[in-house]
Structures are given as structure tokens and as C-alpha cells.
Image: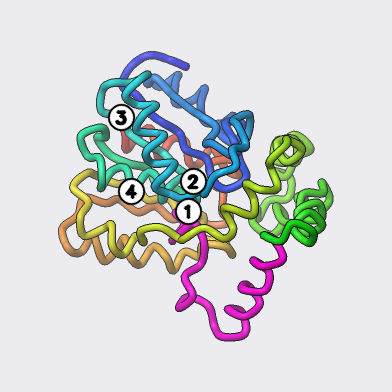
């Protein structure tokens, strides 16, 4: 949508293009050409039976860029999508002029050292259940129930009014596709990927870091990494959004969109 310098929007785990519905028209209206895509395994894209990883999506987005964009773009991501955007900016700087990271994830999955011993044991047992052909289906069907999706969203959105039926349906519908359970299992048991700690010393492109300050999944303490990189001379702007959770671009778009546009300009 729109015309001008290109922006590429990268959604997070379980989401799709629809998660940017409150951002795409505004960014396009500000004089940018906005590209958004459903990552492989999510939304309307194929639920391929493969091993998923951050690097897989990075390479697929690079291919997408080579076919459809062909000029340096700003990559804007939420959660895992932000980690993908940061990885692209570091590993493929020739295709990007910068990145916007919204509540950036630290990895596709938790690294063992990030969890205390009891939780490490629980997550290990859960991952075995998820990847088992019998118990995996039971776990997946429970997690993807609309009532459970709504409860999960209530954890990560501070404003419950933002958790609409439209949002719940957007997350639920792709989970009905053939192969969705295998995608879920593959991603939950995938390696975490390169960490922001490893990536940030190598970044040579400007970053805008937006963080919903009340996010229980990726707490704002994670922004400390970016503050340290900023102190070490990296071109990084950090904006906390008080009262917002894990997806401030969707929860409080009237606060987030102007910040993105001002930075882009």
C-alpha cells in the first residue's frame, strides 16, 4: 500500500498481516510504500512441514526483497518479527536503511540459561508433549481454543478493549489449517537463534526501539541491551510506551504510529 520509500512489516509469533491493520494505512498515508507478509507457517502462508528458525525467515524475507522491493528498506517488526528485522539489519545491511523494533524478542525460544532449574525442567517436559504425535495434538487443540487465545491476549494487552473478536479470530483461523500443529511444534522446539547481545555490537544501521512498558513476556528490562549499545556509539532511539503491553502497535497505535513516522522522516 502507498508509494515512496519502502517499509517491510514483520509480525510476531502466531500473528499475520492483520496485526498491522492499524498501522499500514497510516504509514502509507505518510508517504511510504508499505509491504507486509505472512511469514511461512503463519496467517495465509503455507504451513510447511520443515524445521523453522529465525534464519529461515531471514532468508525468505531477503528473497522477497530481491523479487519485489529491490531498494534498501526499513524493516519494522514486533516480538520475534523485531528479532528477524534486527538480524536482517546486521547480516544483510545492503538491503536495509534501518529497523524499528517493537518489544523485540530475545530469541525464537528460551535459552536454557535464561530459565531457573524448575522452569527449565517444565519447559523441557512441555516441549516433549508438544512434539509427540499423540499428546501434541491435544496440547495444540487446547492452546488454540478461542477462549484460551483471548485469555493469553489478556495477559499481554493491558487494555482489554483492544482484545476484540476480530483479533481473536485473526489468530484462531490459521490454526485450523492443515499442518498448523506441526508448525507450532517445530517453532516451540526450534533453536533460539542469534541473540540481540551478539547482534547489537555489529549493527551499522539506525534503530528505533519501541517498548510497551507493561509487557510481561519481553519485559522492558530487555531495553537495557539497547541502552548499552547506544552508550557504545550505536545510533539507537529508545521510546518506552507506558501502560502498553507486548503489542503496542496494535494496542495503542495512536501513540506508536506518530513515533515511527517522526523517526522515519
Residue shown at 39%/19% (left/top)? 33
Q: Distance between the residues labelled 2 and 3?
A: 16 Å
Query: Which residue bears the numbered disc 2?
Result: 78
Colour pattern: rainbow
- Contact? badges 2 and 1 (CB < 8 Å): yes
Q: Nearer the viewer, mark 4 or mark 2?
A: 4
Q: Which residue position is annotated with label 1? A: 103
User: Is tag 4's residue or tag 2's residue first in the polypeptide sequence?
Assistant: 2
Give above or below for 216 relative to 12: below
Q: Who comes first in sequence, dot 2 or dot 3?
A: 3
Taking the magenta stretch, the answer to whether it contains residue 120 is yes
Q: Which residue is drawn at 57% across and 31% down?
A: 17
Q: How crowded is mark 3: few (under 14 residues within 10 Å), some or many (20 or more)?
A: many
Whether residue 244 is visible, yes or no, is: no
19 sits to left or right of 238: right
Of tags 4 and 3, which is closer to the observer? 4
Write the start and end of the magenta stretch as one range: 103-130
| Mark closest to the chain's N terminus, 4 or 3 | 3
User: Depth check: 71 or 128 in front?
Assistant: 128
Task: Residue 172 in the image: state x and y as whole percent.
Answer: 75, 40
Q: Helix, strand, or loop for circle 2?
A: strand
Amino acid at each position: 500500500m502507498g508509494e515512496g520509500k519502502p517499509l517491510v512489516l514483520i509480525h510476531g509469533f502466531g500473528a499475520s498481516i492483520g496485526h498491522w491493520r492499524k498501522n499500514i494505512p497510516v504509514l502509507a498515508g505518510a508517504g511510504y510504500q508499505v509491504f507486509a507478509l505472512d511469514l511461512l507457517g503463519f496467517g495465509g502462508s503455507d504451513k510447511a512441514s520443515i524445521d523453522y528458525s529465525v534464519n529461515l525467515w531471514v532468508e525468505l524475507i531477503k528473497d522477497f526483497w530481491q523479487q519485489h522491493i529491490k531498494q534498501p528498506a526499513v524493516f519494522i517488526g514486533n516480538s520475534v518479527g523485531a528479532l528477524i528485522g534486527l538480524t536482517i539489519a546486521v547480516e544483510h545491511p545492503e538491503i536495509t536503511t534501518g529497523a524499528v523494533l517493537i518489544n523485540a524478542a530475545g530469541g525464537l525460544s528460551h535459552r536454557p540459561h535464561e530459565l531457573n532449574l524448575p522452569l527449565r525442567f517444565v519447559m523441557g517436559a512441555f516441549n516433549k508433549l508438544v512434539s509427540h504425535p499423540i499428546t501434541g495434538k491435544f496440547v495444540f487443540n487446547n492452546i488454540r481454543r478461542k477462549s484460551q487465545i483471548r485469555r493469553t491476549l489478556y495477559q499481554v494487552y493491558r487494555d482489554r478493549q483492544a482484545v476484540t473478536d476480530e483479533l481473536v479470530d485473526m489468530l484462531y483461523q490459521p490454526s485450523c489449517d492443515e499442518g498448523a500443529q506441526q508448525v507450532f511444534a517445530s517453532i516451540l522446539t526450534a533453536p533460539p537463534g542469534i541473540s540481540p547481545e551478539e547482534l547489537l555490537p555489529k549493527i551499522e544501521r539506525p534503530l528505533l526501539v519501541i517498548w510497551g512498558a507493561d509487557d510481561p513476556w519481553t519485559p522492558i528490562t530487555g531495553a537495557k541491551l539497547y541502552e548499552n549499545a547506544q552508550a557504545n556509539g550505536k545510533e539507537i532511539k529508545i521510546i518506552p510506551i507506558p501502560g502498553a503491553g507486548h503489542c503496542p502497535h496494535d494496542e495503542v497505535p495512536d501513540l506508536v504510529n506518530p513515533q515511527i513516522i517522526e523517526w522515519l522522516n
